[in-house]
Image: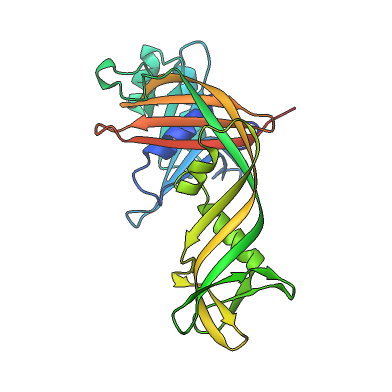
Amino acid sequence: MPQRTNDFQTMVTLITTLLRKHRSVVVTPSAMLADDITGDLREVDICLESDATGQKVVVGIECRAWKKSQSVEWVEAMYGKHGHLPTDALVLVSQSGFTANALKVAEFYHIRAITPGQVTPELIGGVVGALNLGWLKVTNATPQGMRLWVQRPDGVVEFVEAFDATGTLSIYSPDGSMLFDANELIKRTMPNFGMNNPDFRKAIGDAAPGEMSFEFGLDVPLHEGQPVCLLYEGTTIVPVVKMIITGSMTLDVAETPLTHGNYDGTNYSSGKAVFSDRVLHVVLAESDEGITQMVMHSETRSV
């Protein structure tokens, strides 16, 4: 998100992302849209684009985090602005609410006016509305080596060094086409090393902040749905049935105060964690079934 994005706008962007009905919906903060009259680019706080129904729909969302309730003037100004922007609908979000007349004008212009409110008491869940403090962990993993196991033509599983005296091994597809080298395989595999991976959860566990080693295992690594392979003894293509990536990882932990609210009927919790090199914004929401959803945004910390 651009530097001009403030914390309130970031929170609304994350909530909008969390509540979108379909993954095809694109949420863009500080979107620049061309003015129909002048052709100049104008900033819209948040732009939501969808073509899930076969017809493109663009929703503009404008935010204000002022102390005073927003008046008719802001509603009319935004109506005029979007009158010659390529938006099909307009949503105004005010942290401090709207005056009664502003709400009347918004309704007349068919503008959605939203004021984030307090959490509905009867909908307080296990996280939303219940926890006032959380802890966020961020990691930076540096792979340093890889071990591979292949299944030979006779069915025996054999260990192979990914980096031997001859250099870096080449990786093949089952049909014998060369794909890339072992370094690229590591690069493509590392995104799987996250909270959904038991090796990752085990590595960070209750570990104190600092540097630690890790070992990340994966059975039958795939490329575009097919097993990756090696050239065995220079003649035969054999599948890789297991790989382990080793390396070092730094762990950083930051306290995250949580505030709770209700956005257009959905209870949410939001917070901000400040690390040495970045700021993480987080928003959580819980469904009626108690399922917690979370979305985060990272931005470089200004020194």
In the displayed structure, 181 sits above or below 140; it is: below
Instruction: Tell me which corner region of the image, top left, top right, bottom left or bottom right, holds residue 124.
Output: top left
> Percent x, y for residue 51?
38, 53
On the question of residue 115 being in view, the answer is no
Residue placed furthest toward the bottom: 235
**In-front residue for pair 202/130:** 202
Q: 82 above or below 74?
A: below
User: Which of the 4 quarters of the picture holds residue 303?
Assistant: top right
The number of discs equals 0
Q: Quadrant of residue 301?
A: top right
Residue drawn at (45%, 30%) of the image: 283
Residue at 42 percent of width and 24 percent of height: 269
Nearest to the observer: residue 203 or residue 2? 203
- Classify residue 31 as left or right of residue 197: right
Residue 106 position in % (x across, y down): 37, 24
In the image, residue 126 sits, relative to residue 160, either above or below, namely above
Q: From the viewer's side, name the closer residue of 250 and 244.
A: 244
Residue farthest to the top, as pictured: 68
Height in image: 96 above or below 222?
A: above
Q: Residue 161: x and y, percent?
A: 64, 69
Seen at 59% across and 29% down, the residue is 253
Display colour scheme: rainbow
The percent coordinates of residue 26 (x first, y second) are 46, 47
Lateral position of residue 127 relative to residue 188, left or right: left
**Picture residue at 62% right of the left edge, 32% below the top:** 252
Q: Which one is in front, 229 or 293? A: 229
Residue 18 seen in render: yes
Q: Quadrant of the N terminus?
A: top right
